[in-house]
Image (tube, rainbow, N blue to C red):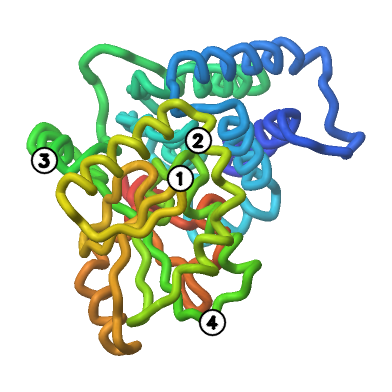
Amino acid sequence: MTIEERKSYFIQVGKFLSLFGDTTNDSIKITAENERFFNELNDKIDQAVHYNGWFTRGNVIFSLQQWSKALTQSNLGQWLEPYKLDKTAQKTVAIIMAGNIPLVGFHDFLSVLISGHKVLVKQSSNDKQLLPVIAGFLMNIAPEFENRIRFTEDRLTDFDAVIATGSNNTARYFEYYFSGKPNIIRKNRNSAAILTGKESKEELEALGEDVFRYFGLGCRNVSKLYVPKEYDFDSFFKAMYPWNTLLNSAKYANNYDYNKAVYLMSEFKLLENGFLILKEDESFGSPIATLFYEQYEGEKELQEKLEQNKKNLQCVVGTNADVDFGQTQHPKLWDYADGVDTLKFLEKL
């Protein structure tokens, strides 16, 4: 199977996933070939939402839409162009996936297969319903993938390399356990936003997407704000207000109430608007319904802080930062997690 063939199959996956979006494109329709998988994935979305209280149908559909937009001829071509993947010596790559947001491990799954390798998938119990259906669709349109895709819930065996994502604690275990294999081990990372006080209403409203999409559980979600001294949070809170509907989620509401109570009992100084707590803190991993913030006095001090903490940051949002406001959950295929080039790793196996 050539790289062009593999690319064409994933373009078909992208078109299939677009069936779950709001589209007026008449060329994208449910056909006899994909109807079974459409119905199955639709059912699995409901199962995923029922199983994992942090998954909502809206967020799952959002994830499917992002992948449908990513898996196009132009995006795949731009992503793959720098690499030589047509003569890859086929290896089996094990992937240990996280489960914090829907299909969070799909990029690794895609990378392994499109680079010509076999994949051995160990899913998180929090996100195990969706990917097998997409894999089934892929094997249906390209039977060559049948001996290249394997899922397991058992101990990993018979693999040549590993990509594992987990917490800082599990990463230490992974580093020890997989030390004899080529590996990519990912740890906890969070994202931050830089505010200057000059942001427009539209930019601040877009920041709400970066903060609240997936309830803030993704590594690309903004969990920390850098603000200038004496920053006035009034405009920020007004821009966040449309997301107050998150309180309709019992899990989010419970976390908000719990964290607020803990902070108040500890006599921390807080700012809050009824559904979001702001706490001045140098840390990055803020709890659900909470944003940490840190003040800076000038550009030089800010850049020093960012440089000192770059290993903790997945991405930085701002007017002149890595990512524009509202775009953290729209990564490109070449926006690699932790800045580690997955395809370069796979190319060299």
Mark 2–mark 4 distance (CA, rounded to whole Å): 29 Å
**Residue bearing mark 4:** 198
Which comes before the other along the chain, label 3 or label 4? 3
Query: Residue 339: in sight, yes or no?
Result: no
Report if the CB atoms under discs 2 and 1 are less than 8 Å apart: yes
Where disc 2 sits, the SS reads helix
Secondary structure found at label 3? helix
Task: Name the residue tied to disc 1.
Answer: 275
User: What amino acid is at disc 1?
Assistant: Phe
Decide if residue 49 is on the left or right side of residue 257: right
Residue bearing mark 2? 247
- Residue ID at (23%, 20%): 156
Mark 2 or 4, which is nearer the eye? 2
Residue type of the residue flagged with mark 2: Leu
Which label number is shown at residue 262?
Answer: none
Sequence-first tag of 1 and 3: 3
